[in-house]
Every structure is written in C-alpha cells, then in structure tokens.
Amino acid sequence: MALELPHLLPYKLVKGQTLVAQAARAELASSSSVILKSNFINNNYINYCNNNNNNERRLVVRRDWETMASSPSHSRNNNDIRTINHLRHVDSMATMPSGAGKIPRLNAVILGEALATEENDLVFPTDEFSQQAHVPSPQKYLEMYKRSIEDPAGFWSEIASQFYWKQKWDDSVYSENLDVSKGRVNIEWFKGGITNICYNCLDKNVEAGLGDKIALYWEGNDTGFDDSLTYSQLLHKVCQLANYLKDMGVQKGDAVVIYLPMLLELPITMLACARIGAVHSVVFAGFSAESLSQRIIDCKPKVVITCNAVKRGPKIIHLKDIVDAALVESAKTGVPIDTCLVYENQLAMKRDITKWQDGRDIWWQDVIPKYPTECAVEWVDAEDPLFLLYTSGSTGKPKGVLHTTGGYMVYTATTFKYAFDYKPSDVYWCTADCGWITGHSYVTYGPLLNGASCIVFEGAPNYPDSGRCWDIVDKYKYVTRYSRKSLRILGSVGEPINPSAWRWFYNVVGDSRCPISDTWWQTETGGFMITPLPGAWPQKPGSATFPFFGVKPVIVDEKGVEIEGECSGYLCVKGSWPGAFRTLYGDHERYETTYFKPFTGYYFTGDGCSRQVIIITVYQDKDGYHWLTGRVDDVINVSGHRIGTAEVESALVSHPKCAEAAVVGIEHEVKGQAIYAFVTLVEGEPYSEELRKSLILSVRKQIGAFAAPERIHWAPGLPKTRSGKIMRRILRKIASGQLDELGDTSTLADPNVVEQLISLSNC
C-alpha cells in the first residue's frame, strides 16, 4: 500500500508520559506496500521522555554511533548505515492505552544524542529496495537525467507515447520563451497532439483489463463508513455526470467551480469536466463565502457543484450556506449562476433542512443516476486548458494558475511513477484535499493515469482519535495487526522538513528502512520538481535531494547571476518542463511580472535554496543536494497552505476598528510558519482581548480558519520609510524576538515606532 499524508497533526510527548507517539503505534500489516507522505512531521519528535533510566546504555550507544558516524561515508556499507539508524531505537515494547496494543518505544535520550551529531549522515536505501526500484542506482538516475536535459524532446516523446493520443503532436515537441526581454513568455508541450486525460485515466485502463480493479477507496469522516469504485464503476459515474453537464450547456472551455469535501463525487466531478473539455476549478471547502465568490467572479463558471453539508470531526459545516452567500456576492458583480448542483451528503445533513433556491438548485441524486453510463469523449489539444487552481500571491487577489492537458498529464503521471516507485500491487493513500494541487496531481490524476488504487479520505487524522490514519492503513492490509512491514515508502510535502524530524519519521514510522520522498514543488509546477527517487541515491535528512527528469534548477544571487557549487540564494528554474503552468487566468501580465521578471530568462520560484556538494564513493553531482530554505516573497506557508500577506491584511483592515495592518510569517514548531499580525486601531479605540478575538474572527470568515493569525500585536504605528513603505524586515525581527538584529532604522520616518512596538510585545 502506498500512503501520502500531507496534513496530519503532530503527536508530541511531554516529560513523564509513557506514550511515545500515537502515530508510531501503527505496526501496519505486511501484505502490500505503503507509501506515507506528509508535511506534518516537523518537530513531532520533540519532548520525548526518558522513562527507562538508560543513561549507561545511552553512553555506549552514543560512543558506538560516533565511531561509525565519523568514518568516511564511502567506507561504510548499507549494513553500517542501517546499524546507525537502528541505534536510535529501544527495542522494548510498551502497552499502549485505549487498547492500542504494543508498539516499539523510542528512547528519547538516545535519539536526541544521535540527532545532535548526525547532521551530515547519509541514509542509504536497502539493497533489497534498490534492486526492485524503477531507478535502482545513481548511475541510472544520472543516465536518465542527462538525457532528459540534453534531449528533452526525445526523452518526453518516448514517455508521452505511452498514453493514448487521437492525433500525435506536431514535429516540435515543445517551444518556449522564458525571457521577457525577447517577447511574450510562452510555454507549449505536445502542441497539436489531440488527447483526453479522462480517457487516459479511465477508458484506457478499462480497455487494458483493469475494469474490475478498485480505482478509489473512500473512507468517511466517521469510522465504519466507507465505499469503493472499480475503474468500470468510476467510468460509468463520470459519464453520467458528464452527460448532465452537457445538458446544462457546459461546453469545451467553459469553467465549472467545484466546492466539495473529499467525497468520491469530488474526483468524479473533476474527471467529468475533463471528459467534456470543461475547465474545472476546485475551491477548497474550507474557504469562506467571500473567498469563494472571488474565484467565481474571476472564472465565471457555467455551473457550481457543492453538497449540502460535511462533517469535519464532530462538527457539521453547512457548505450550501457558504455557497449561497458567495452566489449572492457574485451576482452583485454581474456574474449570476443559473445552476447549482447539490450532492445530498446524508451522513452530515438531510435534504429537508437544507436551504433551497428553486430554479437554480438541483439535487445530484435526483438527476445524475438517470443519465446514460456512456459519454463520448471531447478530444482536446494538448495545450487546451484542463483546470484552474487559485493560489495566494503577494497581492490580495488570488492567482488563477492555469494548467493545460497534455504536458500536465505526462508530467504528473511520470512523477507519480518514479517518485513513489509505484508498483501495480500498491494501494496508495494521499490525505491531501483536492482543493490543493497535491490532491489534483497525487490523489486524482497521477494515480489514475498509472492504474493505481487510491484511498480518498474525508475525515481528520485525529478523529475520532489520533490513531485514525493507522487504523485505515491497517484496514487495507489483511495480515497481522499493526505490522509496519507493509510500509514501503514514506514522504513529505508542503513545507521543508527539518533533519531531526526527518529522522524521527524515518525511524519511528518507517522502521529505519523505508526511503522518504521529501519533495519540493508548487501549484505552478504541476508536479514534483526536486525529489528523491527511492532506491537511487542515499538521502540526506532534510534535503529534497536532486531535480526530477527534465528540471534544471539553478541558484542565483540578487543580481540574477548563477552560483556554482556549494551556495545559498534564490531558487530559479532554467527552461520549461511539461507540467509547467501556462499563465495566470486572465492576467498574463501578472504571470510575467511575478514569475519571469525578477530574474530575466528564468522561472523564479519565490523560494530560497542552499546547495551542498557531497562525494558519494565515485559519484559526485556538481549540482549537489538541494535544501529549501523557505519563501522569500510575501507569502506565508502555514501547514502547507500558501497564504498571501496582503490577503490577510485586507481581511484585518476590513474590520471597522482596524486602521492599518501588516502581516509577517514566523517560525512555528508544528505549522512550519504562523501568521503574526501587527494591527493599528482607529483613533480612540482601546486594546482588548475581545477586540483581538474579533479581528481573528474577521480573517476566519473572509478567508478561512487556516489563515487565522497566531498572534495579534497591537501597534500604535508601523515602521515606515519616508516614502511610506512598511519595513517588514523590522517587523519580522520583532515578531521572532530577534531584537538585537533590527539593523539600520535610520531610514524610518519615525524611528520611535520600533521602541513602541517592542514595549507592546507582551500585550
């Protein structure tokens, strides 16, 4: 079984507890392989307890570990490395509360001592894993990567030919211009090729004999509620919805907004849109009515598809009410919606108490089952749009990232296959929501294009208890309860994972044997850009390692000059790749300004990166291991959610008692980053806890709960230059408590503001 977990909550221990981590209690069954992918791992290992009085053992282990760790990496064999990793474990078993059974208990002191000296350790894949991997060695990776860079047309043509094309692409596999000084930025892959991604996901697999294979497993919010669809059943349901959409006048190129939770109807709707050439825009069903209306106004959909309500843990969220409010706002701006298809989610709410607008609202269950289970495919050009996905930018307006069909299809399928070392026997689970790019690429399209069986999870990882995810993994195993031998690959996505947390993930969850796909990519890239290939390279904890095939990452200085060797700087990409987004919907100028003007001739990622060159036996990659150091623009990454500072500031300033606001990101041991807001109130308004809560609620209502500030810092004024520019650098230092690193404040219009802010730090 393959398992991807981007949004699990952390499990931490405090001194005196015998419970190590409920995540670790999963000793998953061993009949098939699991891939675990997560962005929640950072700092999960924090505060482990030392209950076993193992000081003597700890000293021996530390001494033995240091002896091996200090030896040259090229002189160690795989057994040495595995021995080093196993030294972090205590092999005793402890009885867990609540009937959780027995699990290995990790000794905190041994782990902590090892982590303190292991920063440069390399973790090698096992021989057994490498022998069966798609890319089994550094030599094979370098051979494939070299060809993908030197002959991208030939490399990607061979891969693309594995998919169904009604008509092959033009002689030129790709064309590109990333240099704004040479004209309009333009990227095209497989132009002239006629295909359909839904056909390649479903029909092609059914025709290949996979019709009876499970395509999607569904696990509901509450335990005991599940469902599944074979490839044939999924195809039939997709065709029924596609026929309905055509009856509603949806044509090729029209937009459809999807505001659904993680029900099976969500991927069904995405695929139905793709089948008829419509452009789907999934909006995360946690966004507010205002955020939803902004997206509806921007893309002007023919139909909005939602459900009446959803359960999130013990809470019921009335999604239809949110949609109703959003449609009122969109109508005011001249974007009325005539059709709203509503799925009756009976596990959350019955239809008789759902608010309704006759003539516009239609129950899914009343119409869709009546339609034929066959629907003709709308064949589209490779460069025809597939979907819009809105992501936060440094300005208040969300950016409509547009991905096209052919290149995205080829790239997503290929990254899924190699980054997860996918095998047909795997059952794959990605807990990401389809409201984000991970759900598009690695819940829906990537797995289905490879004929995989994928789990769709509606619930929360800590409901009804913290062992929910491991219960689900165990459910799809059928052998010994709680045997982690079924885990084959682990992973991490959403934000950089620190080395110590990486090792916790590797040792506790992966039993010191499962490779970790610690990937770096973006909504804009469509798929993984820098990622380990399990079985190919030894891994360096915390590093995203090496570029995927066809990707040419470069690190540049502030002047845009490429830096060679070991360095730190701005991460850019030279040249295009098939999965690259083509534009920002309706705003190509912003597309060029944001991504291609900062460093002429390159795609600017907005991320910082450092590179470390390591010699591994006879192999040395001049590009080295890549380490992502975080955003360098005004975007904050909170638990994998990219949130524009301007968007939060606008929500705060909309409060009648807020005169001005400035938002910065601060480090957070669980979320990666958290939102820290400096707020200036209108004259005469006193500071109060009630007002603080009201400001936070304003953000929750306008954007969503995930964007709520972690801290409101009262500000009599903000540090501004004489030209009126807010000095966010100073605000970041104050927010993080780095008061001795404020730097030069002489350019401020009122330097006294800084002292006032510092004096209010604890208010």
Image: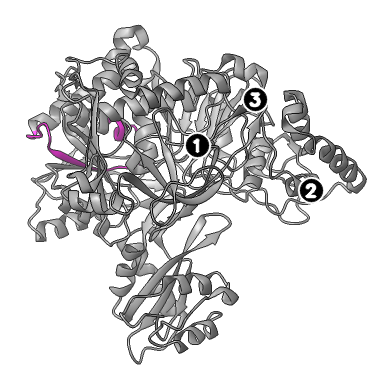
Q: In the image, which is nearer the foreground, mark 1 or mark 3?
A: 3
Q: Residue 113 has which mark?
A: 2
Q: Which residue is mark 3?
A: 618
Q: Position of residue 504 (x, y in %)?
A: 67, 42
Which kind of residue does numbered mark 1 sit on? Thr
In reply to whether residue 389 is colored magenta, the answer given is: no
Extent of the magenta region: 248-268
* Kind of element beneath mark 3: loop
Q: Position of residue 572 (x, y in %)?
A: 39, 45
Q: Earlier in the sequence, mark 1 or mark 3?
A: 1
Which kind of residue does numbered mark 2 sit on? Glu
Q: Position of residue 199 (x, y in %)?
A: 24, 19
Q: In the image, which is nearer the foreground, mark 2 or mark 3?
A: 3
Outermost residue, bottom side? 684
Q: Earlier in the sequence, mark 2 or mark 3?
A: 2
Say left or right for 49 vs 278: right
Q: Residue 223 has which mark?
A: 1
479 or 386, which is in the foreground? 386
The answer to whether residue 394 shows anywhere in this view is yes
